[in-house]
Amino acid sequence: MKQQKTGIVIAAHGRHYLADVDGSHVQCVTRGKKTNVAVGDIVDVTFTSPDQAVIDKIQERRTLLYRSDQYKSKLLAANVTQLFIVVATEPSFSDDLVSRATVAAEAAGIAVRLVLNKVDVTANLEQARTRLKVYAAMGYPVHEVSAKERPDDTVAELAPLLDGQSTILIGQSGMGKSSLINLLVPDADIATREISAKLDTGKHTTTFTRLYHLSGGASVIDSPGFQEFGLYHLSEGMLERAFRDFAPYLGGCKYYNCRHLAEPQCAILDAVGAGKIAPMRHELYGQLLHESAQTLY
Ligand code: GDP
Ligand code: ZN
């Protein structure tokens, strides 16, 4: 009789997955051509050899994040409880990408924290702080750290926030995400090399999403590059609710089906006019409405 067990998916590369089953790494494939498995998924597997298995079932997910693939959404990570968006004083970060990430997290029911790295680069510090005020005003905590110059303080600030959570870190290249992962996850490099060898990704060692276990059941997910989040699966209703800064005004529009674009007596447009909602956020909302409409064709 074949042995069935439960594990957690710790890396994905095409249709090849690596699952942690009772502490050992098992190569997994899906049945048929299915690619509906995400890093972080809890899966029931049947062993086909001592270190290989087939995924039979994905257990119910608490949360699910999608990654963007030009008007298609693919799975990025499952069961994440919080998102750390890593930005830095330099190079300059993109408000558009940061905002899209907040929308993706809100839609999925995931908490958001912003991590401002490289605060030792004081020349651009005030400018970065000013730009982050928009997010702080929405209630997203902003943590100032310096992975390189003040590693101990950085760990003291961020490590306690990981307890009991499944945290995904994202950031544009150059922000210091790898430096932060290396501080927060002991032996991250070794784990990555092991996973890469088992997944048989060849030399493309950093092009896959992976999950690291921390002591006490917490986990950290590292996603390569800046994964643009897939938002095309969101309905218009879900989209407006994913803008946390819109919340106080929703329901205040004259028309119940108001899309907040050019309608008269729109509470959202009024709030933009009154400086309560940042124009950048409203523009992004319009852009996302437009993008999700494109997927209908
Ligand atoms: P990633 O592309 O986001 O993974 O960024 P890396 O961790 O590779 O860091 C990009 C560059 O920024 C590297 O040269 C790091 O040494 C540097 N860096 C990372 N953290 C800090 C920091 O806190 N202060 C300064 N000044 N440089 C940093
Ligand atoms: Zn409106």
Image (cartoon, rainbow, N blue to C red):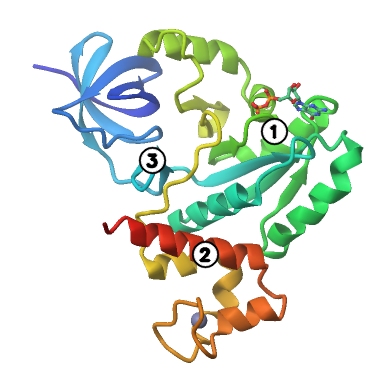
| Labels 1 & 3 near each other (Cβ < 8 A) | no
- Give, as a three-letter code, the residue at label 1: Met
Q: Which mark is residue 175?
A: 1
Tell me if residue 251 comes above or below residue 84 in the rendering.
below
The type of residue carrying mark 2 is Tyr
Please tell me which of labels 1 and 3 falls first in the chain.
3
- Tell me the crowding category of disc 3: few under 14, some 14 to 19, or many 20 or more residues within 10 angstroms, Cα based: few
Q: Position of residue 77 (x, y in %)?
A: 42, 38
Which is more toward the observer, 286 or 29?
286
**Quarter assignment of residue 21:** top left
Q: In 3D space, how far apart are the residues under numbered discs 1 and 3 (Cα atoms)?
A: 23 Å
- Give the secondary structure at mark 1: loop
**Amino acid type, label 3:** Asp
Residue 285 disc label: 2
User: Would you say the beta carbon of the disc 1 residue lies within 8 angstroms of ligand 1?
Assistant: yes
Badge 2: residue crowd in 10 Å (few <14, some 14–19, many ≥20): many
